[in-house]
Image (cartoon, coloured by chain):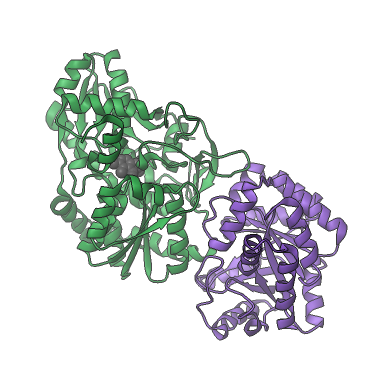
């Protein structure tokens, strides 16, 4: 299994859609073959179409607001006394998280395909909120599938979705979290694929959804590369790009332009959700060595039992609370290009506390997992090591959880 | 595989000038023992029995079958139990075809070759794998055939002409036509006339293939589709199991009565 150079990772799959011969694919019911094929053709056409690229760039700039800033966390770095810690504040993007890139692109594709309805899944509520925003902007009718547990714990984002005119469909099956929301969304698409477009909220699902999402979030590293050149005049000799991994869309977007670099120069570190310290449950298929399985139409490392039943997961972060992970991250793991680890709930909360104590940023619980790893390793290095964290979400949505756990408002 | 039990069942039904009746229940719903009893009892009326191997993340099943699957998993059903149900059933009725139906991850975890070998040993006649479409299923289908097991291809209203041809040519004794865009258990939202017209298109490609129609078939709708080679009823049966459990009534009797009534509507 080997990575190729000069080819975007999203395109390094075989004719059946597998990365490294075994991750990804399209394990879908017959009914979805045609809509998936249509979408694949349309995306292939659009990504080569100059007008479409222009349109994308226009909305990325004027609607999403790019570039998002790249800042040094001076106080945190000084406090930890090791590597320099920097952050890309992707949460400045319209709506408050990176999910807006994928949502905007899907809305544009939906329009291009002449469909009037768009549906999507959400965990933390950001994917849903952004899809509802994009749907409103482009005049599409929008339905969001969300686990009942997540509806309760991410209320601010639900309020936003409703305000944007989207219908939230609560999902009561299974663990009532993201995994069930994605299943229900796919079922809805099976029944309505003739007039409805489906957006998958991360780099998961059948091959084409991994590609579209990765193609969209790549914007993050395109910006970062320029910002690094501006700040350091070159790509520094020792960089560590730390990102939380749920499905893996923000991590892929943050890393994609740097995958071809030697890993001694640019190390890629993905941080999964380790769950509560005292619980056996987690959402860390890569770093806790789950077996390969098929979930939501793709083969990836999946938290499951040896019969192939998908395990329940547990995490304080709704956005990371998912038993599977992107096939492209499985590929990056097996080729050893990226390193994956996990942070538990308590570490993420402590990281949140420390970061917000020293810096004027407000990362949500998902990137707080990435910060936890940054804080852990920073003291081990010296100033010439540049640690960059993708602060990909804003903590407004976590207001209730943070208040309960930290007594903060 | 022309002399397979599956082919034979269609021939028998044809002799009686009626479609074959295919029933679907979930293995282990609501217990191992009970589902074997149900199977034994309904096999007096059903021509082919489908047995679902329950998965907890079924992306193509509606509420009724999900409920049955969750119930079976909660009651501890394991894949080997399912094979033992089939084994016991076949000792009771060796000529009644059994088709296992489920999602690919369970086969993948069990190991494809081991799974097929187990199927062969327990005399499973056919396999339906919901999320292993053509052409990805080619090698698996060939392995099945080598072991004398029918791999059953699915066709849906969205299947293109070109695909249709290829799927039919790679199919074995039986093809499953999904009546409409829906998960299992949806309400029949397409007219029977239209469904039969689509069904004919498949038959016209190759008259020797047995084509069954499934999804949305209930006591109300079954009669209108009786021109087909076979008709599959699943969710309506699973629903009855749920209802009977809730009312503390005899599940076996109630389910058998439904199947009896379904059969009466097509003879
Ligand atoms: C702010 C934020 N970060 C991260 C994630 C995890 O998803 P991904 O790994 O695709 O970026 C989510 C998902 O909801 C999120 O809202």
Q: Which residue is drawn at 44% across and 32% down?
A: A333
Chain A representation colour: green
x and y percent of residue B105 in the render?
A: 59, 47
Q: Can residue B135 be seen in this view?
A: no
Q: Chain B is drawn in which colour?
A: purple
* Residue at 56% in and 74% down: B179
A268 relative to A294 in the view: left or right: left
At 43% from the left and 26% from the top, the residue drawn is A277
* Up-down relation of residue B30 to residue A401 (above or below): below
Where does the C terminus of chain A fall, quadrant-wise? top left
Q: Is residue A153 left or right of residue B74?
A: left
Of the pair A47 and B62, the residue shown nearer to us: B62
Looking at the rendering, the quadrant in which ligand 1 lies is top left
Residue A322 can be seen, yes or no: yes
Taking A315 as reference, is B81 above or below it?
A: below
Q: Is residue A160 above or below residue A254?
A: below
Q: Where is residue B50 in the image (x, y as percent from the top left)?
A: 70, 62
Residue A173 x %, y %: 49, 53
Give the percent coordinates (x, y) of residue A158: 29, 53
The answer to which of B60 and B145 lies nearer the viewer is B60
């Amino acid at each position: 299994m080997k990575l190729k150079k000069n080819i975007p990772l999203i395109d390094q799959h075989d004719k059946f859609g597998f990365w490294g011969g075994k991750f990804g694919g399209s394990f879908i019911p017959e009914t979805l073959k045609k809509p998936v094929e249509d979408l694949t053709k349309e995306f292939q056409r659009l990504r080569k179409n100059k007008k479409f690229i222009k349109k994308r760039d226009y909305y990325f700039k004027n609607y999403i607001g790019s570039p998002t800033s790249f800042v040094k966390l001076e106080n945190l770095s000084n406090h930890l006394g090791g590597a320099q810690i920097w952050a890309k504040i992707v949460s400045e993007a319209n709506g408050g998280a990176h999910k807006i890139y994928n949502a905007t692109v899907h809305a544009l594709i939906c329009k291009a395909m002449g469909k009037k309805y768009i549906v999507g899944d959400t965990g933390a509520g950001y994917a849903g909120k952004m899809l509802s925003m994009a749907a409103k902007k482009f005049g599409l009718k929008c339905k969001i599938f969300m686990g009942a547990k997540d509806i309760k714990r991410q209320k601010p984002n639900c309020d936003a979705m409703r305000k944007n005119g989207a219908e939230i469909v609560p999902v009561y099956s299974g663990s009532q979290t993201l995994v069930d929301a994605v299943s229900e969304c796919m079922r809805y698409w099976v029944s309505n694929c003739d007039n409805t477009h489906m957006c998958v909220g991360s780099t998961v699902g059948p091959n084409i959804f991994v590609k579209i999402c990765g193609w969209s979030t790549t914007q993050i590293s395109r910006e970062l590369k320029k910002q690094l050149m501006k700040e350091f005049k070159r790509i520094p000799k020792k960089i560590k790009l730390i990102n939380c991994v749920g499905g893996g869309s923000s991590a892929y977007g943050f890393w994609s332009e740097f995958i071809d670099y030697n890993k001694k120069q640019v190390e890629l570190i993905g941080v999964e959700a380790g769950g509560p310290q005292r619980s056996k449950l987690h959402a860390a298929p890569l770093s806790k060595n789950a077996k390969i399985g098929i979930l939501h139409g793709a083969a990836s490392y999946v938290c499951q039992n040896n019969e192939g039943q998908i395990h329940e997961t547990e995490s304080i972060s709704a956005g990371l609370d998912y038993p599977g992970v992107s096939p492209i991250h499985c590929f990056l793991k097996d080729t050893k290009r990226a390193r994956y680890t996990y942070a538990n709930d308590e570490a993420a909360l402590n990281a949140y506390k420390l970061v917000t104590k020293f810096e004027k940023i407000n990362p949500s619980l998902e990137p707080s997992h990435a910060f936890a790893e940054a804080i852990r390793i920073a003291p081990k290095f010296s100033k010439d090591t540049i640690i960059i964290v993708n602060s990909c979400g804003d903590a407004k949505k976590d207001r209730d959880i943070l208040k309960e756990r930290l007594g903060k408002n | 595989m022309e002399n397979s039990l599956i082919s034979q069942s269609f021939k028998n039904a044809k002799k009686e000038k009626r479609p074959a009746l295919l029933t679907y229940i979930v293995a282990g719903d609501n217990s191992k023992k009970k589902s074997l009893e149900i199977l034994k009892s309904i096999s007096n009326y059903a021509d082919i029995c489908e047995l679902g191997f329950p998965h907890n993340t079924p992306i193509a099943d509606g509420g009724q079958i999900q409920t049955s699957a969750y119930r079976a998993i909660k009651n501890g059903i394991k894949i080997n139990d399912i094979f033992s149900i089939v084994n016991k059933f076949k000792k009771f009725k060796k000529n009644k075809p059994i088709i296992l139906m489920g999602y690919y991850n369970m086969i993948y975890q069990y190991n494809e070759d081991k799974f097929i070998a187990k199927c062969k040993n327990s005399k499973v006649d056919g396999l339906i794998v919901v999320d292993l479409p053509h052409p990805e299923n080619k090698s698996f289908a060939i392995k099945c055939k080598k072991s004398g097991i029918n791999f059953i291809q699915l066709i849906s209203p969205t299947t293109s002409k070109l695909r249709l041809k290829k799927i039919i040519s790679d199919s074995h004794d039986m093809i499953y036509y999904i009546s409409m865009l829906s998960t299992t258990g949806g309400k029949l939202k397409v007219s029977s006339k239209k469904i039969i017209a689509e069904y004919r298109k498949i038959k016209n490609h190759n008259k020797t293939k047995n084509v069954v129609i499934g999804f949305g078939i209930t006591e109300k709708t079954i009669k209108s589709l009786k021109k087909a080679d076979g008709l599959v009823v699943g969710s309506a049966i699973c629903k009855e199991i749920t209802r009977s459990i809730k009312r503390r009534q005899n599940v076996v009797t109630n389910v058998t009565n439904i199947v009896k009534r379904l059969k009466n509507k097509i003879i």
